Image (tube, rainbow, N blue to C red):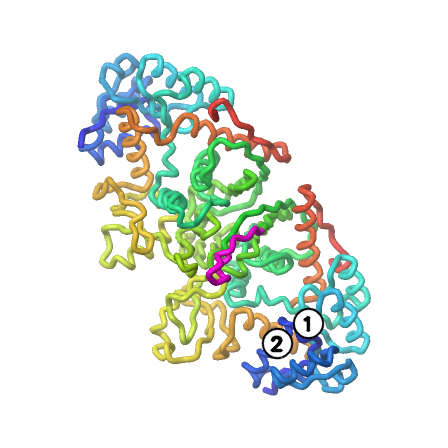
Amino acid sequence: MSPVRFGMIGGGSRASGYVHLTKILPERFALSSVLIRNPEKRGAVAQRFDVPVCGDLDSLLASKPQFVVVSVPRAVAPDLTKELRRRDVPVLSETPPAPDLEGLIALYRQTDSGRMVQVSEQFHLMPMHNARVAVVRSGMLGTATEAQVSCAHGYHGVSLLRRLLEVSFEPVTITARRFNAPIVNPNIEDALKEEQEYQTLAWLDYGNKLGVFDFTRSQYFTRLRSARILVRGDLGEISGTTVRYLNNELKPMIAELIRHDSGDDPRLKDRWGNRVTSETTEFAWGWMEQRSHKGITLGDEWIYVNPFFPGHMSDDEVGIAHCLQLMAEYVDGGPSFYSLAEAAQDHYLGMMIDKAAETGVPVLAEPQVWSC
Amino acid sequence: MTQTRFAVIGGGRRALQFLRVARQLPDLFAVSSVFVRDPEKREKLAQEWKVPTCGTLDDLLTSKPEFVVVCVSWDAAPVLIKELFDRGMPALSETPPAPNLEGLIQLYQQTERGRMVQVSEQCHLRPMHLARTLTAQSGLLGSIAEAQVSAFHGYHGVSIMRKLLGVGFEPVKIVARTFVSPVTAVEESSERRAEECQTLSWLDYGDRLGVFDFASSQYFTRIRASRVLVRGDRGEIDTTTVRYMEQNAAPVTAELARHEAVSDSDTEDCRRSVVASERHGAAHEPRLLKGIALGDKWIFRNPFFPASLSDDQVAVATCLQGMAEYVGGGPGFYSLAEAAQDHYLGMMIDKAVETGMPVLAEPQIWSS
């Protein structure tokens, strides 16, 4: 298998994540070239990461990438995406693909309804979230009717919510509130600085389905705030990592989504606060191995297997690696995994949550141009 | 320890729970008499429970109880509580003590601001809920700003939320809604498909936020668990997991672990119990709970160990104990004012649902 060969525009923190992946998994991913306009930055990136760089689009395309990752500020991303599409190059855009509703609509129209454009939304492709989506799709919870997601901001949180609820572009009524509370920031050494932060809470009412969005910024940055997920169907629920369901004999069952990691201390928690309960006896050598994620089991079933094992990666990086892999398959005629329409809808709903929170009045998010 | 002698009015499900607790803890509690008006029901209860019964209030009082547990319908309760008050007899009322706001205000006035009245709100006294409240009150999480409670309906859920938030009778803005969805509930071996109604609400105190969330199936099926979140500026409790900071600001994670005298291995026992304890039905199964520990500290010790009691019965016994101390001159454990406030907020949540508009719950007569 030859590695997926992709180009990239941008040299920021998200972009360096992609570069890092090519270093961890060189047999799978290779950068053809990285386009950075600012010559100083370009030199710094070339030196720091030892990757081919260039200063204009022509040179980038001459490096023959299968597709190009657009990882630039959201204000300039749409123009680059359009330009690449004009030149018939497939695009994997960072989230969000455009800054506002107007920009999303324009981008969708100007790219022939987002043809050969996908978006690098990694949250639902991170192992534990991926496993939860797999549980929902397996049907063991019956039909999903409710999802409560408290783990990611705006479009990221909405993307998970929509996947778990299995909704597409239906109209939805949104009620939202902001709540301010103090939090001590334990990341600042010796300072214990108290900060004010605001939490956003929202109800997304689809009529027959309900989404509950809840996020406060410190959930990204401190271990004092955990992630919380609830998915309910008529036959069961997932709460955190615990799955409750009715088996074939309609007997109530409880099972745990269990992470299996190599090189793992069983008492660690992962970045998202999930309990790492994998009893590593199965991997007797696991203690000596490089730390990597093997997958997630539910009872006697592997509900998720990490294809990038034994790569030494964070959950976030596993999510991005999936995006790159799926994009390569998409370019080869495979299915869409997170289209421009999906990304536009998630960002649109994220913005509508903000609007409802700011005005205090329920808003109706109506179907947009990408919904038909 | 002296034995507490109490009487009961009523013969329904909740009344029987008090009789059960008294039977399990004969050294601590004795039932002086049970007042049931219907002669047939009275006779049946006397035979089944082997307790003295009577058919009039006069007879009940001549049985010389220290206080009377009032376990009757919502409508009848305030009338009986007032009657007992007029006769100088302390009352431990079931929740809620009166059916509506008017009734709550009236009862409060008629009993000289709830003098000699306490209410048997047992939900916040169930061991795991009590352990969370005690952890929040210990200051481990810093000052509490948020509580999300998805465990009980109406006043029960509100009572836990208020305890966790540490709020009194402050005005609060309430937004609420319902969500109807199907659930397959399994009772015994029969499957029952039902539409159920979930209530969700935000209670905004300005500097504190309460989130109420309840679906009735949480009481009845094993496929719906309880969820509780408490957040302070220095940590949080997520159901049974506590996250906080040590003195040197290092973040720490610890589990509220149940310790029970049943299993061959303590560790295994704790882990299994954690899962089981957050299911409502489990609160009605007999256990041999020693207590709940957080890290190397016992947060809660079950004073009734080694009696075989369910979590709900531990809470009922705690209510009876608290009432005995109150009658003996001790501080109350859940006053008429507290109960009135919790029922009032529960009703205001319903009102916010019905009108679809935010409502302001203003301080009532019992708040000053």
Q: Check whether the beta carbons of the residues at disc 1 and disc 2 lie within 8 A of each other.
A: yes
Tags 1 and 2 on a common chain: yes
| Residues shaded magenta | A185-197
Is A28 left or right of B289, judged from the image as shown?
Answer: right
Helix, strand or loop under label 2:
helix
- Label 1, secondary structure: give it: loop
Instruction: Name the image quarter holding residue A7.
Output: bottom right
Where does the image place residue B295, in percent across and percent down from the top left? 32, 56
Q: Earlier in the sequence, mark 1 or mark 2?
A: 2
Camera-nearest residue between A234 and B271? B271
- From the top left corner, tell me how far across and down residue B294 is, in percent: 33, 53
Crowd class of label 1 (few under 14; some 14 to 19; many from 20; radius 10 Å): many
Magenta span contains residue A186: yes
Q: Where is residue B357, by image quadrant? A: top right
Which part of the image, by quadrant, shows the C terminus of chain A? bottom right
Provide the residue designation for mark 2.
Answer: A18
Task: Specify the amino acid type for callout 1.
Answer: Ser
